[in-house]
Amino acid sequence: MLTPFLITLFVGYLLGALPFGYLVARAHGVDIFKVGSGSPGATNVKRVLGSKAGNTVFALDALKGALATGWPLLAMSADLLVPTQLAGVVGALLGHSFSCFTRFKGGKGVATGAGGLLVLLPVATLIAGAIWVVTFYASRYVSLASLVAAVVLPVAAWFLGRPPVLVGFAALIAVFVLIRHRANIQRLMAGTENRFTPKQGGGGPKA
């Protein structure tokens, strides 16, 4: 009985572990682990290399989350579908955060989680995404926008009457995001968190 879950967890991990932030930065001659915040996430890539590179990483990271969550639709029976989809997105988040391709270093999982949740909870995820946009443009803090959106997600899912297992999963994702952003939370409380200022021109330093 565990085999379908282990398969989707493993496939999700491998998809999530694909280090798109690192690869896009290397294509620009940059080791993303050594610049900016040291994170291979889309925000750091965008800050260092500009909007085009950052948006590309965000889209690719979201895509791997969506694929990890969506492929069971083609392979799993109805009774196993939701549980295996949940295993897929969990695997993707773990892979992104602790990638075996980059010595188990990774990003915070916001884009990857958003891609998976867009498959599982499309309306609630779009609501949370809209809240992210509003919070970001009001504050210019990416971390604050991500934290607020993470909290809004399970609340929106609950109000929309989604199944309890999905509401509970959304709440667990929110907790995961909060834990991954604990350093940002400390800086926000201390007033030392940096507001987002993207690199102008979209280029990057060459190695």
Image (tube, grey):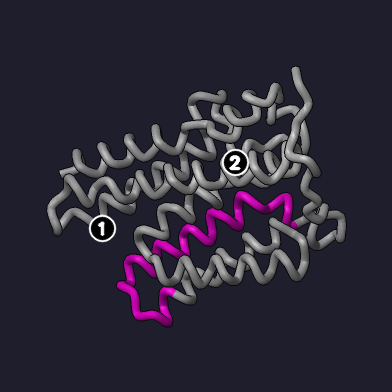
Q: Which residue is painted at 41% across and 60% down in the image?
A: 118
* Nearer-the-camera pick, 204 or 70: 204
Q: What residue lies at 60% left-to-right and 46% top-to-bottom? A: 55
**How far apart are labels 1 and 2 at the CA level?**
26 Å
The secondary structure making up most of the magenta span is helix
Q: Residue 107's mark?
A: 2
Quick check: is 156 in the magenta stretch?
A: no
Q: Which residues are magenta?
A: 157-185
Whether 146 is drawn above or below 20: the answer is: below
Residue drawn at 56 percent across, 24 percent down: 103
The x and y percentages for residue 51 are 68, 46
Quadrant, the C terminus? top right
Question: For residue 136, what is the image quadrant?
Answer: bottom right
Q: Nearer the viewer, residue 100 or 46?
A: 46
Is residue 37 visible in the rendered structure shown here?
no
Element at label 2: loop
Residue 27 percent across, percent down from the top left: 62, 24
Rendered position, 7 above or below 165? above
**Residue that label 1 marks:** 82
Q: Residue furthest right?
A: 191
Residue type marked 2: Gly
Indicate whether residue 177 is drawn in magenta.
yes
What residue is drawn where x is 63% and y is 67%?
148
Pointers 1 and 2 in contact (C-beta within 8 Å): no
Between discs 1 and 2, the one toward the N terminus: 1
